[in-house]
Image (spheres, grey):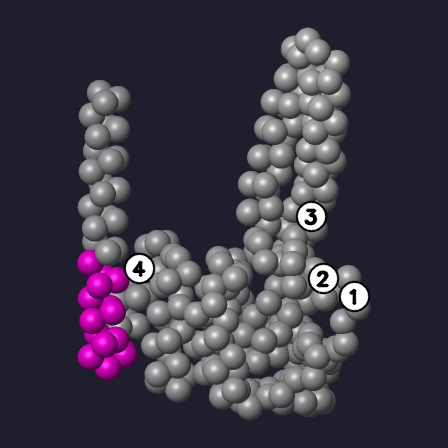
Amino acid sequence: MKNILFLLCIITSSIAAQNNDSLFVSANNFYKNADFEKAIEHYKKIEEKGAVSPELYLNLGNTYYKLNQVGPAIYYYEKALKLDPIQDDVLNNLVFAKRLALDNIAVVPKTVFQRFHENYLQKLTYNEWAFLAVIFSFLTAVLFLLFYFAYTPSKKRLYFTTSGLSFILFIFVIFITYNEYNRSKNNKEAIVFAEKTTIRNAPTLNAEAIFTLHEGTKVIVLDAIDNWKKIKLADGKQGWIIANEVKLLTDF
């Protein structure tokens, strides 16, 4: 009975994968024929099934870009970067998409540590850092066992030293993983989808309007009350926006 269930699971998974591949090929063909609405429809079917990938999000971004829909284009490019932060095609296309956005937000100057964090540590997701931590923990255990069973003093010194270095790297990577997870969880990035929206100083429609934003602008969501979200811009400005006018990049 267990074998039958196992085979059924394999067959079901295989059929689902083939179906997603078929949808992806069809969507690409619609894109090539400039039928962008149909292409989006097929790409979205794959997304709804949870079969997401950097390639899927890249193609969705490209399709929305062809339709001059800046908000969704930037949104899906950013989603692709969440899965693969160093994909050149996404990074290049995102630059072009951002040129269509109307808001020019001046970024607050970053410290040396912030630049190092952005240029190096953020190149890997917290899941990838966690995988590295597992590798270093395994390496530490293996090297320690080699040290324990080694007979010659020179080999014992070598294995002890390398196991110690591996353990230090393990602790360092665990620290990075923890920080990256908290950063992803607390810095809830979102993209403005409204063509034009008014940002207010309180979560009510009769509150004072402090500035306006346009679609495609990237913000950090700090808080949420009812149908309002408190956001922060790259230049430090903060305010309240109607919740359905922004779309979160992550599911946290």
User: Which of these two is toward me, 228 or 144?
Assistant: 144
Report the residue marked by disc 3.
Answer: 176
Cα separation between marks 2 and 4 = 36 Å
The amino acid type, in three-letter code, at marker 2 is Phe
Badge number at residue 46: 4
Against 215, is 79 above or below? above
Report the residue marked by disc 2.
Answer: 116
Cα separation between marks 4 and 1 = 41 Å
Q: Residue at x 48, y 75 (%)?
A: 92
Against 249, is 151 above or below? above
Badge number at residue 112: 1
Residue 32 lies within the magenta run: yes
Name the N-terminal-most of marks 2 and 4.
4
Crowd class of label 2 (few under 14; some 14 to 19; many from 20; radius 10 Å): few
User: Which of these two is toward me, 181 or 240?
Assistant: 181
Mark 1 and mark 2 residues within 8 Å of each other at the beta carbon? yes
